[in-house]
Image: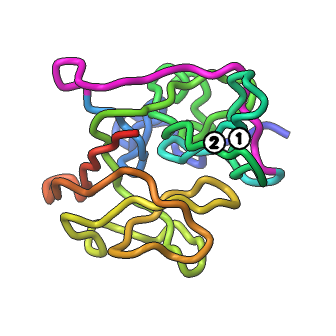
Amino acid sequence: MAEQSGKTLSLHGDPIWKGTYTHNGTLLKLHDYCFTTGYAKLVPVNGVKVEFGSAVWYNAADKNNTVYAAKPASNAVFAGILARNPAIASGYPAANDEVKDFEKALLAKDGYLVYKEAYKAADDTKTLKFSDIQVGMKMYVRDANGHVTFAASAPAGHTAVNGTVVMLNPDDQSWTVKLSI
């Protein structure tokens, strides 16, 4: 079955081949003040798409540069955030906000990331918006699937990462997060 974006092909409509305004994990390259790496293989969670802006982990015992969308049961080490890649997004427009297991994205380990939505910790729905965010909130990652949330204190089942909301952007309803591993 072919995937469709659900958008109308029109010069007057929303962007077809570009992402919409809800895509997460855009890395701000301010004078290249960022640190990214690649990975050898992405192991997704069954049935859960791996989105840009989500977190992944290494299994430190493997030493093979494989990243996992779910936190490994042992030897888990936070690998980074999957930074939005315009080449992947434009090359696969029906699913332009996710990373397939055969694609190679970049792992942001240090830099500034822009988010426009996130997952609520309580029910793991992607309904956390600009109005819910405050400067100083910390970034947390759900262990079961790498979904990112922002809160003042650690929710159950989440791992704290060294990410902090440093700026609110009311013009486009986004927030900027400083990430450092």
Q: Quadrant of residue 2?
A: top right
Q: Give the range drawn in magenta.
A: 29-45
The amino acid beneath tag 1 is: Tyr
* Quadrant of the drawing holding the N terminus: top right
* Quadrant of the drawing holding the C terminus: top left
Left/right placement of residue 13 relative to residue 1 reads: left
Q: Is mark 1 on a helix, strand or loop?
A: strand
| Frontmost residue, 50 versus 155 | 155
Percent across and percent down for residue 119 are 50, 66
Residue shown at 42% from the left, 33% from the top = 109
Q: Mark 2 points at which residue?
A: 57
Q: How far apart are marks 1 and 2 (CA)?
A: 5 Å
Residue 34 falls inside the magenta stretch:
yes
Left/right placement of residue 121 relative to residue 116 reads: right
Residue shown at 72% from the left, 38% from the top = 59
Q: Mark 1 points at which residue?
A: 68
Residue shown at 70% from the left, 33% from the top = 100
Sequence-wise first label, 1 or 2: 2
Q: Is the magenta stretch mostly helix, strand or loop?
A: loop
